[in-house]
Amino acid sequence: MHETYMAKRKKEMKKAPKRMMQDVVRLSYNMSGKMTNVLSLSTNVNKNTRCMHRHNSCPTSICANCFAIKTVNHYDRLHINLNYNTDNLINRKLTLNETRDIAIEILYALEKNETHKFRFESFGDLNNTIQAWNYLAIVSDLAILAENHNYYIECALWTKNIDYLVKAFDEFDEILKGYIRSVLNVLISSTFIGLPIGQGLIDKTEKRLGMPIGVFTVEKEENEKTNCGARNCTKCGKCYKKFAATTYLWEVLK
């Protein structure tokens, strides 16, 4: 039992220096499995109207098999932290000081752990345009900080609610859009198992964002298309390395 506990402890990421910690949101430092050593900021899937509608009313969707719901409902502390994030991210646009403080904690935490990957939404999805704007503002601040610190970072955001993101993106000026594009990969997660999103939505999204996106699809069984099966995002990194063209990612259902 002691060895198991110690093994788990070794997987936990070190937190940013205390002076860099902020209280606007709570980052997920201690994810395990394929997300080991990947820092994340997420909301609670249970509070997302679209997520819960898909989960409850679409039995053929990937949402009916939602892994995030099972995980969030299993860990009380995680549930509390994600509720805190949801409440703070969806109701108002954060101030410039707040987004900068979040970006500072992220950067210093990545540096402290000698890692480079940051993920938006590991346990939920975009709830509205306000949340999407807050994420993009954090990304732009993070990109600027990383450039000033000469520290390489890779950010990825998974969503089924891409309409919120493109609307929020339009609110930024071209300089900040450039910073966002320099570090962020956007991946549209397919709603249905084995069925990628349509080419029309891909083309429209890439035109609005001005960059290639990822198309993430889950299948029931491993096959020749499977290219997300290592269960180790740190070693694989396909979703985080900047896309040079539309990129299709295929994962096997958990």
Image (tube, rainbow, N blue to C red):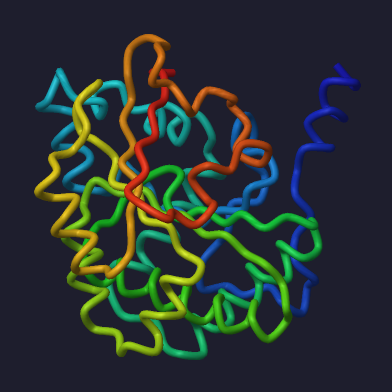
Q: Position of residue 66 (x, y in %)?
A: 33, 27
Report how many numbered discs are placed on residues in the image. 0
Tell me the quadrant of the picture where the N terminus can be found: top right
Q: On the picture, is 78 further left or further right than 89?
A: right
226 is higher (above) or lower (below) than 107: above
| Residue in the image at 38% along x and 28% along y | 250
Tell me the quadrant of the picture where the C terminus can be found: top left
Q: Position of residue 174 (x, y in %)?
A: 32, 88
236 vs 54, nearest the viewer: 236
222 vs 23, nearest the viewer: 222
| Residue in the image at 53% along x and 51% along y | 240
Q: Position of residue 87 (x, y in %)?
A: 35, 64
196 is higher (above) or lower (below) than 81: above
Q: On the picture, is 199 further left or further right than 174?
A: left
Q: On the picture, is 173 further left or further right than 253?
A: left
22 is higher (above) or lower (below) than 119: below
Which residue is the extreme one toward the front?
Answer: 244
Q: Position of residue 79 (x, y in %)?
A: 47, 44
Quarter occupied by residue 170: bottom left
| Residue in the image at 51% along x and 67% along y | 183
Quarter occupied by residue 116: bottom right
